[in-house]
Amino acid sequence: MISENQTIEERYGLEDIDTIAVGLLVNAPLDQIAEIVAQFGAEWEQDIHEQNIQNPGLLVFQFRGHSWTGILDVSMTDKYTYVTTDTFDDSHNFVTCSWDWELQAQSISQQLHTRTIYYWVDDSGLTIGYVYWENGELMERLEFDEAIWQDNHDEALLDEPERQVEPHLFESKFRRLTAGEIENAYSFVEDFLHEQQAYAATRLSRFKCQRDDFIRIDYIAFV
């Protein structure tokens, strides 16, 4: 797990699992990613910091000492920006109709001939997962959903109530492993991100990141 004592360069894995978040990581410089994302938006603002944002959009950012650029829905962060409630509500987040995370993960990976990771976590729905692409090719996918897992293991849980929460779906092109062989989906996601030396932000707030922790943070407005 990530420690508050770690420098920003040393942080890998998920920023937080006690939240609801969806994001995208791209192994490429921020400027290249922002140019692509800006094609979908109405306005591109560079180098924002603790700026009050009142319209839906995406944050594109890169941490100092990291090769991955991150993309987050501005409405789901709570440190550097906020969205006023009279603009839109969280029950109909703009990304559901304007930005397909998995499709963009594949497209950007193909366009830039690089690696991308689409990831999500939901502590209320008890779901977690990721999809990993290389040069536009799907390399690995893991999905865990508590409801599906419970349905699949009802009888087994009577005999093994402490049974680990393996994913209900896992596929990979670079390692031989089945979903049933993964003992804990949460630990597996964390280990995977460490293997990729990737820091998957969720809210940009857990460790009180400062301006100099970032190479830059850009905002792509969608209205």
Image (cartoon, rainbow, N blue to C red):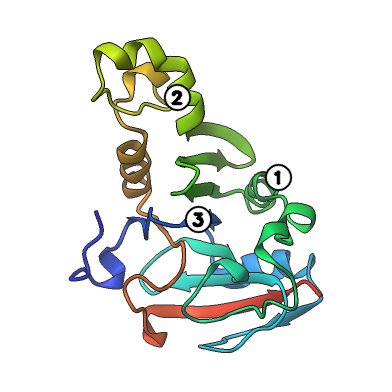
Rendered-image quadrant of the C terminus: bottom right
Which amino acid type is marked by label 2? Trp
Quarter holding residue 191: top left
How dense is the environment of label 1, judged by Cα within 10 Å: few (below 14), some, or many (20 and up)? Answer: few
Observer-nearest of 60 and 150:
150
CA gap, disc 2 and disc 3: 19 Å
Q: Percent x, y for residue 200?
A: 43, 57
Disc 1 or 3, which lies upstream in sequence? 3
Instruction: Label 1, secondary structure: give it.
Output: helix
Q: Percent x, y for residue 9?
A: 30, 68
Residue 169 in view in this figure: no
Instruction: Label 2, secondary structure: give it.
Output: helix
Identify the residue at image location x=24%, y=16%: 160
Which amino acid type is marked by label 1? Leu
Q: Residue 40, labelled with which disc?
A: none
Disc 2 or 1, which lies upstream in sequence? 1
Q: Residue 149, labelled with which disc?
A: 2
Identify the residue at image location x=53%, y=32%: 139
Identify the residue at image location x=50%, y=33%: 143
CA gap, disc 2 and disc 1: 26 Å
Q: Which circle, 2 or 1, is nearer the viewer?
A: 2
Instruction: Label 3, secondary structure: give it.
Output: strand
Q: Which circle, 1 or 3, is nearer the viewer?
A: 3
Q: Percent x, y for residue 166?
A: 37, 26
Which amino acid type is marked by label 3? Ile
- Residue indicated by mark 3: 20
Disc 2 or 3, which lies upstream in sequence? 3
Q: Check the image and name the residue furthest to the left.
A: 5
Observer-nearest of 6 and 167:
167
- Residue indicated by mark 1: 103
Residue 11 in view in this figure: yes
